[in-house]
Image (cartoon, rainbow, N blue to C red):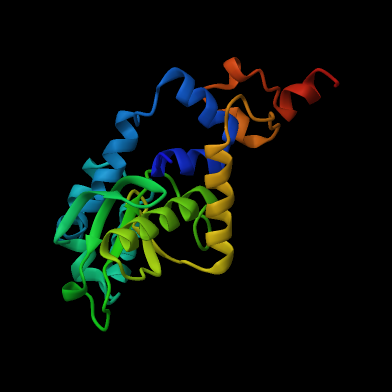
Amino acid sequence: MDTVSFSDLARAAYCPRQLYYARKSDDRSLPADATARIELAFRYRELLAAPNRVTEVPVDVSVETYRHRLESLRDRPWWPAIAEPDRTEVFLSGRDCHGVATKILEPTQLPASDTAVPTIATPGAPPESGVWEPQSVRAVAVALALSWEREQSIDRCLVEYPAHGVVREVRLTVRRKATYRRTLRAVRSMDGPPPRVDDDRCTSCSYRDTCGVRTRSLSSLLGL
């Protein structure tokens, strides 16, 4: 059975119907502004050392907030590894999924760790705590793919929100792995457009017109 890409899994976790139209149009590329935000994940040390440069890059918080958050990251045990990782943009191919991990933090870089820790960087904003479900599903997929390649258990992944100076840890809990498996099954069984959704996700979706979903705000305006 063919493996599923990390990005397809994450998109399906957000909206299966969006994935259907993305596949149909063969459009999986990231906008340039999203790529620029992700690339900040490779500049933490530089931006911490020269705060004036923060005004020149696409961060989504104030310079003071960004600097404070990077200073907080510097106190984490994995800071040296995430700031200067041995391996970046690593292609992984697991039993069920494939794609690119933003970084691989090797055990030699991590205190009291016998296994590597992968990371994924996302251009968006973090929730107040934890991570959004699409990123949780993607994080599980990345960790399991690395585990498959190295034939050892990988029980966590870091999710980076570089435009916000935030890094969150995702543990591979029973609940998260169940959500991952459910999403994987949905992607593999997709042979037509999934049922429509009708919520706030539709407002910013680039496939809204093609999909034909009416948002609740439009429906209310029409009195429906």
What x and y, as percent, mark residue 40? 25, 48
Residue 178 position (above or below residue 215): below
- Residue at 56% in and 45% down: 185
Residue 159 visible (yes or no): no
- Residue at 34% in and 28% down: 29
Residue, far bottom: 112
- Please give the count of numbered marks on the rendered protein: 0
Residue, far front: 1
- Residue at 27% in and 79% down: 113
Residue nearer the viewer, 163 or 67: 163
**Dividing the image into 4 quarters, which one contains the N terminus?**
top left
Residue nearer the viewer, 82 or 64: 82
Left/right placement of residue 140 relative to residue 39 reads right
What x and y, as percent, mark residue 92? 28, 50
Residue 101 visible (yes or no): yes
Residue 197 position (above or below residue 162): above
- Residue at 52% in and 69% down: 173
Residue nearer the viewer, 201 or 117: 117
What x and y, as percent, mark residue 3? 40, 42
**Dividing the image into 4 quarters, which one contains the C terminus?**
top right
What x and y, as percent, mark residue 198? 71, 31
